[in-house]
């Protein structure tokens, strides 16, 4: 994890805006089409996958590539709610595979 420090709130907001623009620039066409009900896989960065289900999207233009999701993994088998930027989604998975992985405790 990388930690950044700022002298002012304005500097922090500027950095956040820049990071959001950079993430938006990485979005592939198929990722932009991810919608509520879709299931996906992404990488935890810790050596295990994270599986998620999109619950809803946002209508605000600046949040167009964020989805509100419940995500699961071996580290959090009960699931966790939060926002996911679609550029971090590696692939979609079928509902059947998602449910089978859930039954297996998210073990691949």
Image (cartoon, helix red, strand yellow):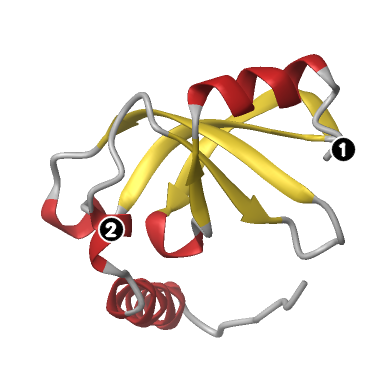
Q: Could you tell me which residue is drawn at 23 percent across and 49 percent down? A: 33
Q: Secondary structure at mark 1?
A: loop
Q: Is residue 72 above or below residue 90?
A: above
Q: Residue 55, which numbered label?
A: none
Q: Could you tell me which residue is drawn at 19 percent across and 59 percent down? A: 62
Which quarter of the image is occupied by the N terminus? Answer: bottom right
Horizontal side, residue 103 vs residue 80: left or right: right
Q: Position of residue 31 (x, y in %)?
A: 33, 57
Residues 62 and 79: in front is: 79
Q: Position of residue 40 (x, y in %)?
A: 52, 42
Horizontal side, residue 9 vs residue 105: left or right: left
Residues 44 and 108: in front is: 108
Q: Please rate how many residues cluster around mark 1, counting C-alpha atoms within 10 Å: few if below 14, some from 14 to 19, many from 20.
A: some
Q: Position of residue 107 (x, y in %)?
A: 86, 35
Q: Is residue 26 above or below residue 68?
A: below
Q: Please rate how many residues cluster around mark 2, counting C-alpha atoms within 10 Å: few if below 14, some from 14 to 19, many from 20.
A: few
Residues 35 and 22: in front is: 35
Nearest to the eye among marks 2 and 1: give it: 2
Q: Is residue 3 above or below residue 108?
A: below
Residue bearing mark 1: 75
The tally of labels here is 2
Q: Could you tell me which residue is drawn at 74 percent across and 56 percent down? A: 44
How much space separates mark 2 and mark 1, taking CA atoms?
28 Å
Horizontal side, residue 19 vs residue 42: left or right: left
Which quarter of the image is occupied by the C terminus? Answer: top right
Q: Secondary structure at mark 2?
A: helix
Q: Residue 30, which numbered label?
A: 2
* Residue 25: quarter of image: bottom left
Q: Position of residue 105 (x, y in %)?
A: 85, 23
* Residue 102: quarter of image: top right
Q: Could you tell me which residue is drawn at 46 percent across and 43 percent down? A: 83
Tell me which label, 2 or 1, sits earlier in the chain: 2
């Amino acid at each position: 994890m990388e930690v950044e420090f700022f002298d002012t709130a304005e500097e922090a907001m500027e950095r956040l805006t820049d990071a959001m623009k950079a993430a938006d620039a990485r979005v592939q066409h198929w990722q932009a089409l991810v919608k509520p009900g879709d299931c996906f896989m992404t990488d935890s960065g810790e050596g295990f996958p994270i599986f998620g289900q999109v619950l809803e999207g946002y209508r605000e233009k600046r949040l167009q590539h964020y989805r509100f999701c419940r995500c699961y993994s071996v580290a959090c088998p009960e699931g966790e709610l939060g926002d996911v930027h679609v550029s971090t989604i590696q692939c979609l998975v079928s509902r059947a595979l998602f449910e089978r992985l859930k039954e297996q405790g998210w073990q691949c």
